[in-house]
Amino acid sequence: QVQLVESGGGLVQAGGSLRLSCAASGSILSFVAMGWYRQAPGKQRESVATIFTTGGSTNYVDSVKGRFTISRDNTRNKVYLQMNSLKPEETAVYYCNARDIWGRNTDWGQGTQVTVSS
């Protein structure tokens, strides 16, 4: 099974930017779509952004539209999340996940912590 490893999190001031990376151990073209999720303390995990591996169409949760950009590099088997104008309420652990043609999702990894200070 393809493993996904997230990186790029850190501490940033409100209004700042971070770029998260998700590295796959195999070809991301084996997946239909890949996405970024986040889980804040005491809250449910939510989908933030999704990208389809062929075609490259994207979807975003309303709260990040215009500030976050998801992208993929099929040759490097990586997916990125560029996050601009970060807000303190976006402090969370950010996870990468993927879905195959049978609708199966990958296992959740460790995620990467994003902390936005006010």
Image: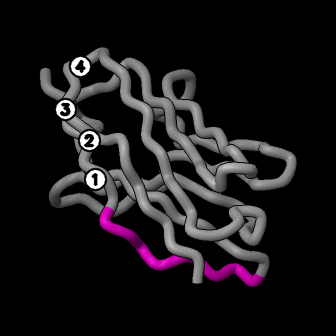
Residue that appears at 57% across and 55% down? 35
- Of callouts 2 and 4, which one flags the residue occurring earlier in the amino acid sequence? 4
Q: Which mark is residue 104?
A: none
Its colouring scheme is: one colour
Q: CA distance from mark 2 to mark 3?
A: 6 Å
Mark 1–mark 4 distance (CA, rounded to whole Å):
16 Å
Viewer-side residue, 49 vs 43: 49
Q: Amino acid at mark 2?
A: Val
> Which of the two discs, 4 and 3, sits closer to the camera?
3
Quarter of the view holding residue 32: bottom right
Q: Which residues are magenta?
A: 102-110
* Residue bearing mark 2: 114
Residue placed most toward the observer, 1 or 53: 1
Question: Which residue is denoted by mark 1 in the rendering?
Answer: 93
Q: Earlier in the sequence, mark 3 or mark 1?
A: 3
Report x, y in % for residue 41: 17, 56
Residue ranking furthest to the top: 15
Q: Residue 27, located in which quarter of the rendered image?
A: bottom right
Circle 3: element type: strand
Question: Answer yes or no: do the residues labelled 2 and 1 have beta carbons within 8 Å?
Answer: yes
Q: What kind of element bears circle 1? A: strand
Residue 90 location, x and y as percent? 29, 37
Going by the image, does 70 lie left or right of 57?
A: left
Q: Say if the magenta span includes residue 105.
A: yes
Separation (CA) of disc 3 from disc 1: 12 Å
Marks 2/1: CA–CA distance = 6 Å
- Which residue bears the numbered disc 3? 11
Residue name at image x 70 percent, y 43 percent? 58
